[in-house]
Amino acid sequence: MQAFTLHKGLVAPMDRENVDTDAIIPKQFLKSIKRTGFGPNLFDEWRYLDHGEPGQDPGTRRANPDFVLNQPRYTGASVLLARQNFGCGSSREHAPWALEQYGFRALIAPSFADIFFNNCFKNGVLPIVLPESAVNQLFDEVKAFPGYQLTVDLPRQVVIKPDGAEIPFDVQPFRKYCLVNGFDDIGLTLRHSDKIKAFEAERLARMPWLAQRVR
């Protein structure tokens, strides 16, 4: 998992409440058994005017010119500004996969659905909860100033605006530790690889029959 310490990026505003995971990555794309390739289908039903299926070439499809991520001023955005209850609906982990693979590193909203919130941390995406008044002001500034960028400093737990003003945010210490070090659940386990190998070797020495194959 990619570590997260300091990130500066263009902000895209998703000005809708209760954006659910089926909107983030529609159900037909969950057929894939891979963990890659979901970025082109992020917000698929809003992003395109035609119905999408796995394996389609995005270049052959009709983009919706009114959708925020299709607007040239937000090309390359890596910080998503959202409204209340972002990520509600089903618990599909494909939603943070799609956001991360599109290029988003941080999400900012007044609230997130619980399971989606947890899944983001496990997949290298930082969900930041800010007061609604602060989010409203950010929406106004993003829309008023093309090229609006924010800097997210996770070690210091602040969002830094273009004028240098800082907005503090809370994050659970263990989640912060994992993101700063790039540890997903497997990475956390592999920190103890020497102990795991020693345990397996000792167990095999005591019970050598475990290494025998059943024929």
Image (spheres, rainbow, N blue to C red):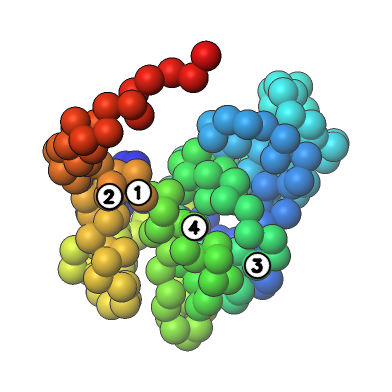
Q: Residue at x 53, y 76 (%)?
A: 111
Query: Which residue, given by chain and number where applicable, does mark 1 sit on?
Result: 184
- Per the image, label 3 sits on a secondary structure element best described as loop
**In the picture, which quadrant includes the N terminus?**
top left
Kind of residue at disc 2: Leu
Q: Earlier in the sequence, mark 4 or mark 1?
A: 4
The quadrant in which residue 2 appears is top left
Query: Which residue, given by chain and number where applicable, does mark 3 sit on?
Result: 88
Cα distance in 3D space between marks 4 and 3? 12 Å
Q: Can see residue 66? A: no
x, y percent for residue 44? 72, 43
Q: Is residue 159 left or right of residue 37?
A: left
Asked if the residue at tag 2 contacts the one at tag 1, i.e. Cβ–Cβ closer than 8 Å, the answer is yes
Residue sitting nearer the eye, 140 or 134: 134
Kind of residue at disc 4: Asn
Asked if the residue at tag 3 contacts the one at tag 2, i.e. Cβ–Cβ closer than 8 Å, the answer is no
Kind of residue at disc 3: Cys
Cα distance in 3D space between marks 1 and 2? 6 Å
Q: Which mark is residue 119?
A: 4
- Per the image, label 1 sits on a secondary structure element best described as loop
Q: Is residue 20 left or right of residue 184?
A: right
Asked if the residue at tag 3 contacts the one at tag 4, i.e. Cβ–Cβ closer than 8 Å, the answer is no
Could you classify mark 2 by the number of other residues whose Cα lies within 10 Å: few (under 14), some (14-19), or many (20 or more)? few
